[in-house]
Amino acid sequence: MNKFLQIFKIPDLRRKVFLVLLWLLVFRLLAAIPIPGIDKLKLQEFFSNNQLFGFLNIFSGGGLSNLSVMMLGVGPYITATIIMQLLTIIFPKLKQYYYEEGAEGRAKFNRISRFLTIPLAALQAYGFLNLLTSQQVLTKLPLAALLSNVIVITAGSVLLMWIGELISEYKIGNGISLLIFAGIVSGLPTYVYESFANYTPGVLPTYIAFIILSIVVIGGVVFVSEGERKIPVSYAKQVRGNKLYGGVSTYLPLKVNQAGVIPIIFAISLLLFPQFFAQIMSVVSTDLSLRINEIVSRIFNNIYIYSASYFVLVVLFTYFYTAITFDPEEISKNLQRTGGFIPGIRPGQATAEVIGRVVRRITFFGALFLGIVAVLPNVTQIVTGIQALTIGGTALLIVVSVALEVLKQVESQLTMREYEGIF
């Protein structure tokens, strides 16, 4: 509480907090402006019967369920960033930008991601509008109106990307993450209202158990998100002139969940692909497109098949993403350059093998954790039979991760200002 009050006592920090809140308010206002030609009843029915697009609605901050000008949210930018990270495997120059050239290299990397966001946003907007038109959620638009909507939606995504990066400059959390966080939190009042509206006296024990389990799950998410495996590292003593350097012992922290929520995004993207493929096939044959769409909908509307597929894909993508973003050999080389070593292990290849083995072991638990959290809402619905009650899920993981990140950044700024006050 004292730290919370200190935020508002420091003029510079207070200004930053209010500016972040102002930009989040602008985002929520824009997310409420819909595009024309919507059948609201059919739109609600579409999202209630489609879990995949319900997930995408989380990343758009509720803009997708309103078909607002911000309907794609930061999804295209996240997709562009993921594509760029995957391309670092193919193109060494990109890997050099991202890993070796420091802040300047990452700025170049992010600039390319921003340019890639524009065509991705346009393609996603066009595909999604076509899908909604085929489901009779939208009235069929003439080509000029369709293109104008695509341009407006693309501009909304680019504007949101700019707002996110602007928020990041205030160093009160990551801007893109905070926008997703704001969208999720904005839906909490509706969620609470629906839970009470569906309440019946006979299920009071279920609601009590739900509240207790929710607290346990939130605690578990915090525990695993902050969990680390610490590998001891020692530094050799070095004599430079008349002074002795090194000789200290520290540790290399390896997070249990190295991949964050990226594997869940990968899994959902793969699950969404068949439906978008069906829309692309409409160019060749309308009947074939409708048949593929019907088969895909029948398969993934089965909660058991959907949950099992989702869980397996999240686990596999956790290993995949950790493998492409975490390089034990590079860490081993960096340790060797700085005179560091793991006690009892030879520097070089032997150190890389030890780090790789530890990462594989903790990734197993991180992958299981992500998979369980991802399918927990479906498991809750299966067990309780109540649609309004869902524990866990990607939304909870994002909210907890962003809250912890904001807390750390605010604490670091407060600590820095305490030192400034001393000097």
Image (cartoon, rainbow, N blue to C red):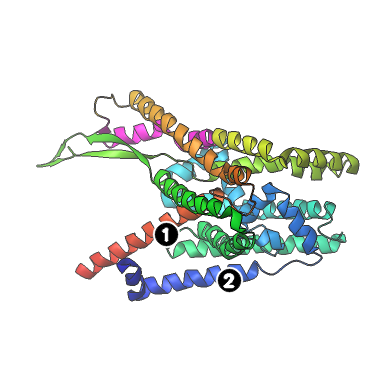
In reply to whether residue 329 is colored magenta, the answer given is yes
Residue 112 screen position, x and y as percent? 58, 51
Query: Going from the N terminus, do you reach mark 2 or mark 1 first?
Result: 2
User: Of the numbered discs in the image, which one, if any, rests on residue 158?
Assistant: none
Q: Is residue 285 above or below residue 396?
A: above
Q: How many marks?
A: 2
Q: Secondary structure at mark 1?
A: helix
Q: Which residues are magenta?
A: 318-342
Identify residue for label 2. 26
Q: Is residue 343 above or below residue 45?
A: above
Measured from the top left, where is residue 10 in percent x and y? 33, 74
Pointer 1 residue: 406
Splitting the image into 4 quarters, where does residue 335 fall?
Answer: top left
Q: Residue at x 65, y 51 (%)?
A: 387
Image-quadrant location for residue 3:
bottom left
Q: Name the residue at the front extreme.
A: 202
Q: Secondary structure at mark 2?
A: helix
Which residue lies at the image location 79% right of the left edge and 64% below the top edge? 38
Which is nearer the eye, 92 or 127?
127
Q: In this image, 50 relative to 398: left or right?
A: right
State the residue in front, 300 or 386.
386
The C terminus, quarter of image: bottom left
For residue 367, above or below residue 416: above
Type of the residue with mark 2: Val
Magenta part, dominant SS: helix
